[in-house]
Every structure is written in structure tokens, then in C-alpha cells.
Image (cartoon, helix red, strand yellow):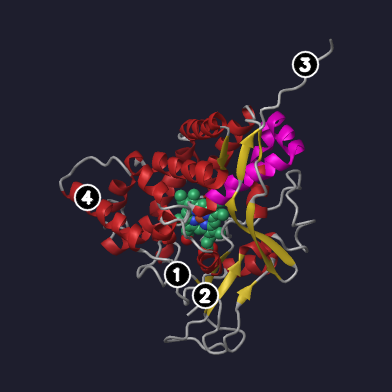
């Protein structure tokens, strides 16, 4: 059954617009998260994403300490060093592709640093931007259809999606972490800590450990890659914003917030509507999936002036890019700090990047709104022109 389609009437069921999405995101009784997403590639729930209160609070509270601003901030300089290395590499070669050669290794490098797993970096990069298309990515064959299935939460039709790569990895690392816990070895990384989490006086089951590890690897991947690629794409094309941000570090937080609003990297997510308003039956196989469309909230013209424009001077207003309410993004501090560290390094010594050719971007139209769905490729070259010598 597809996310957001009534299994009986076949009608698309989607909640759109700023106020409606906010209200639905807060109302877990009417719009439950108690569901299995990615049904084509996994059989266990991502936690805490796919449970309702009170179970939700147990998982969220257990994970929260890893994601506090203070816990993430200690990695700022390491994030900046990774950004510097990757930016310098493109500049030294004279050209590069931002999504695959900068954003992907940057985001994976930051997660390897954050999770204490430097030994996994190359393996994680080899999966590409989305854990569910790792095999197709390795063959260089991810199709627009697979990307659309992910965006639309459409898990019915056959695509290139598969859970094999991620699940083989998780089997391996979680089994090893459990053996170390059993032997009383001091925890050294995120998997060691995960299998010893305190869930109300007990350790996670293997299914729970898989569900948590799954979102730790999948949640902060394609989303942040899109954010980093989008930042570079925008700054290359908009020298005025580049100059303003280089001179005004205090404006970086607000700019990152505007990039998240505009790009809305997590376009939609599923809920189960407990009492469907359109007569769609519930129960048994007939669960009524409905989509919360975060991008539509962030581009709602009744909430935002010129929503289709990136305006880093926009008056502050909370966007819904990280969701809203209990399930709002647990990794928000990670995403924002990764973006700010990258921005700081990029602007401190602008590497004179220019677009080498027209970027390949997938746009989607939904009614009156047009969204930037994904960056296929943003090729850059280094502008080697030097200012003309003055005078004589
Ligand atoms: C720009 C990057 C990101 C965006 C746009 C984003 C977006 C979101 C959104 C919209 C939700 C709410 C889903 C819902 O209401 O059902 C969410 C939840 C979540 N995100 Fe993110 N995310 C990003 C980065 C990250 C990162 C870096 C991590 C971890 C390293 C992460 C981990 C999670 C987790 C664990 C949840 C579930 C929270 C809960 O259910 O209580 N995300 N994210």
C-alpha cells in the first residue's frame, strides 16, 4: 500500500499547508506515527520515529543526550577540518561535483566523527546518498523513479530500493557491539552505547537496536547532503549573499534556517489517520496512510512572502523543515552544526568556484508550488582569473 493513498478509493491523501501540517504534526491521536515506513525494504520500525506516546518518550529520552547542542558542539572543529579538506581537494584539482564529491563525503565524515566510527567512513560513502539504493548507486544506476518513491513514500511499485546493504552492515556491527557488552569491554562508539542504552531499566532488544541504528544512519544522510549541496549551489549563483554572510557570521544561523525552509529536505512523512475524514476505511489491511507534506508548509504563500525565493534576510519565523511537535527532528543540532561549520569554512576563504555547466536538478510541481526535489549533479570549476593588475 502506498503512503498517502486510500487503499479502497485510491485517492491521494495528503495534508498540506502551514497551519494544517502544524496541527496534524501535534495531534498524534488523530494522526498516529505507529506504522512501518519503507515497507518494501525493512520489517522493523525506525525508532523513535514510528511509535506514539508513551513508548515514543522512552526511546526519545534515551537518545536525547547524544543530540544535545552541547554534545554536538564539541565536534565543530572536526567538522570544519573535514569541510576544509574536501573544499581544498576540489580547488586543487580545479574541478569537482558538489553532491557526490563534497556533500556526500562531508556528511559521512561528520557522522563517522560524531558516532566514533572512522573505520566505516569509506563503506558509508560507497552507499551513496540514500541507504536504500546503495546497490544501484554502486552500479551508477539510481533512477528518478527510485528517488520519487522515497520522496512520495510510495512503497508499492518495484524500484531499485533494497535493505540488503544496510542490514548486512547492521547485523555485523550490532553483533560485535553485543559481544563486547557481554564481555564488559568499555564502550568506544555509538554502537557500543546503543546496545547498552537504558530503556526503562532494560537494554534494547535486537529489533529495537536495529530500529534505532537504522534511523541514526538513514535520517541524517540524504537530507543533509541536499542541504550542503543547496548551500553551495545558492552561494555560487548569489555573490551578494556570499559577501553578506562572509562579513556577518551572526547571520549564519538564520541563513541555514532559510536554506532548510526552501529545500525542505524531508519533503513528506507518513501518518495513519485514525478516523479518516474522507471515508477511507481503517483496520486490518486497510490502514489509512496520509502524508504530512512539510515542503508544502514551508512554501505556503499564506505563511511566507515569495516562498519560492531563497531570502536569507527573511524575518524569523519557524519553518517546518525539521517537523513539529514530539517527533520533530532529533538530529536538528547535528544538521545545523554541520551546515554552519561548512558555511564558515567555505566563506572564510571563498574558493572561487563557478558552475562548470548547468546543474542537473530535479524539480517537482505540486499544484501551484514548484519544489527543488534533488540535485543530480552540481559541477564546479575553479575560476582562475585574477583581478587585472592596476594602473601602469
Ligand atoms: C537537514 C537535515 C534534516 C532534516 C530536514 C530532517 C527532517 C526531519 C523531520 C521533518 C522529522 C520529523 C518526522 C515526523 O514528524 O515524523 C525528523 C525526525 C527525525 N530525525 Fe531528522 N532531519 C534532518 C537531519 C537529521 C539528522 C542529522 C539526524 C541524526 C543524525 C536525524 C535524525 C532524526 C530522528 C532520530 C528523527 C525522529 C525523531 C522522533 O521521532 O522523535 N535527522 N527529521
Disc 4/disc 2 C-alpha distance (Å): 35 Å
Q: Is mark 3 within 8 Å of ligand 1?
A: no
Q: Residues within 10 Å of mark 3 (few under 14, many from 20)?
A: few
Please tell me whether mark 4 sits on a helix, a strand or a loop: helix
Disc 4/disc 3 C-alpha distance (Å): 62 Å
Q: Is mark 2 within 8 Å of ligand 1?
A: no
Q: Earlier in the sequence, mark 1 or mark 2?
A: 2
* Stretch in magenta: 225-254
Q: Nearer the viewer, mark 3 or mark 1?
A: 3
Disc number for residue 189? none
**Residue at x 34% of width, y 44% of height:** 120
Relative placement, left or right, of 126 versus 150 is left
Relative placement, left or right, of 36 versus 179 is right
Q: Quadrant of the C terminus?
A: top right
Q: Earlier in the sequence, mark 4 or mark 3?
A: 4
Please tell me whether mark 1 sits on a helix, a strand or a loop: loop
Given residues 141 and 296, the one toward you in this image is 141
Residue topped by disc 1: 37
Amino acid at each position: 500500500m502506498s503512503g498517502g493513498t486510500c487503499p479502497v478509493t485510491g485517492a491521494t491523501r495528503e495534508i498540506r499547508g502551514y497551519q494544517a501540517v502544524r496541527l496534524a504534526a501535534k495531534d498524534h491521536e488523530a494522526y498516529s506515527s505507529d506504522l512501518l515506513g519503507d515497507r518494501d525494504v525493512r520489517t522493523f520500525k525506525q525508532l523513535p520515529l514510528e511509535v506514539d506516546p508513551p513508548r515514543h518518550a522512552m526511546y526519545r529520552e534515551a537518545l536525547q543526550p547524544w543530540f544535545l547542542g552541547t554534545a554536538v558542539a564539541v565536534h565543530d572543529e572536526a567538522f570544519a577540518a573535514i569541510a576544509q579538506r574536501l573544499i581544498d581537494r576540489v580547488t586543487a584539482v580545479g574541478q569537482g561535483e558538489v553532491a557526490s564529491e563534497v556533500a556526500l563525503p562531508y556528511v559521512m565524515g561528520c557522522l563517522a566523527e560524531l558516532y566514533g566510527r572512522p573505520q566505516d567512513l569509506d563503506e558509508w560513502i560507497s552507499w551513496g546518498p540514500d541507504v536504500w539504493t546503495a546497490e544501484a548507486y554502486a552500479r551508477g544506476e539510481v533512477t528518478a523513479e527510485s528517488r520519487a518513491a522515497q520522496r512520495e513514500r510510495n512503497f508499492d511499485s518495484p524500484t531499485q530500493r533494497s535493505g540488503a546493504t544496510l542490514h548486512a552492515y547492521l547485523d555485523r556491527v550490532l553483533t560485535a557491539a553485543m559481544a563486547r557488552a557481554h564481555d564488559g569491554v568499555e564502550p568506544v562508539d555509538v554502537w557500543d552505547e546503543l546496545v547498552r542504552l537504558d530503556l526503562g531499566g532494560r537494554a534494547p532488544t535486537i529489533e529495537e537496536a536495529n530500529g534505532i541504528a537504522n534511523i541514526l544512519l538513514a535520517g541524517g544522510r540524504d537530507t543533509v547532503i541536499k542541504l550542503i549541496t543547496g548551500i553551495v549551489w545558492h552561494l555560487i549563483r548569489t555573490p551578494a549573499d556570499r559577501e553578506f554572510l562572509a562579513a556577518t557570521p551572526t547571520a549564519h544561523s538564520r541563513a541555514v534556517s532559510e536554506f532548510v525552509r526552501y529545500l525542505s529536505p524531508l519533503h513528506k512523512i507518513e501518518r495513519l489517520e485514525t478516523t479518516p475524514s474522507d471515508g477511507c476505511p481503517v483496520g486490518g489491511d486497510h490502514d489509512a496512510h496520509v502524508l504530512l507534506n512539510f515542503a508544502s508548509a514551508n512554501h505556503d504563500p499564506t505563511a511566507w512572502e515569495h516562498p519560492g525565493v531563497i531570502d536569507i534576510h527573511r524575518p524569523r519565523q519557524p519553518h517546518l523543515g525539521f517537523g513539529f511537535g514530539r517527533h520533530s527532528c532529533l538530529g536538528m543540532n547535528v544538521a545545523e552544526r554541520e551546515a554552519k561549520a561548512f558555511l564558515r569554512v567555505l566563506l572564510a576563504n571563498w574558493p572561487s568556484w563557478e558552475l562548470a555547466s548547468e546543474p542537473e536538478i530535479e524539480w517537482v510541481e505540486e499544484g501551484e508550488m514548484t519544489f527543488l526535489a534533488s540535485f543530480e549533479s552540481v559541477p564546479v570549476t575553479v575560476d582562475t582569473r585574477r583581478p587585472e593588475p592596476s594602473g601602469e
